[in-house]
Amino acid sequence: MPSISEAAAQLGCSVDTIRRRIQAGEIQARKVAGMWDVLLPDEDPPAPADVMERLVSMLGEQVAELRRQLEVREREVGQLHILLGQRQLEPGKPRKNPLMFWKR
């Protein structure tokens, strides 16, 4: 079984990538006498086009999720602006200067 550096050379990637893939459970490995042995899959690594296609798909999903989160935050900010405006228009309520917190 190859070491992490040997596996990286065989798969054409960095040692850090192999470590991340082991941690993510994508590649199996075991520690023997303080050294990692990597269990490489028998199949050939995916073609670069397949990898790129998968990455583009994953990034597209991430972009869609981040856009959704941004829309939620924009609505929240809008609602907070409305509430702040209403609070500032309320007559008769004494206002404390928030910059003079030590005098409370």
Image (spheres, grey):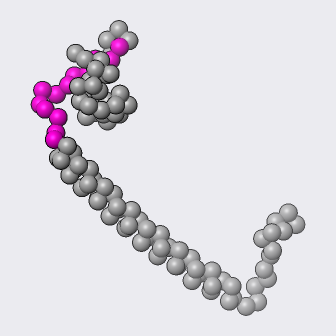
Q: Nearer the viewer, residue 92 or 69?
A: 69
> The N terminus lies in which quarter of the figure?
top left
* Residue sitting nearer the eye, 91 or 15: 15
* Residue drawn at x 32%, y 21% as measured from the top left: 5
Who's the residue at 23% across and 30% down the image? 11
Say above or below: 71 vs 10: below
Query: Magenta part mainly helix, strand or loop?
Result: loop
Q: Is residue 104 visible?
A: no
| Position of the C terminus by quadrant | bottom right
Find residue 96 and report its horizontal and vertical position in percent: 80, 76
x then y, percent, for residue 45: 17, 34
Q: Which residues are magenta?
A: 35-47
As drawn, the residue found furthest toward the top would be: 33
Question: Looking at the image, can residue 6 be seen?
Answer: yes
Relative depth, front residue between 67 and 92: 67
Q: Name the residue at 33% across, 17% down.
A: 36
Does the magenta run of residues contain 43? yes
Residue at the right extreme, as displayed: 103
Query: Residue 43 sits in which quadrant?
Result: top left
Say if the magenta span includes residue 38. Answer: yes
Asked if residue 66 is positioned above or below residue 18 in the image, the reply reads below
Q: Is residue 73 above or below residue 40?
A: below
* Residue sitting at x 88%, y 66%: 103
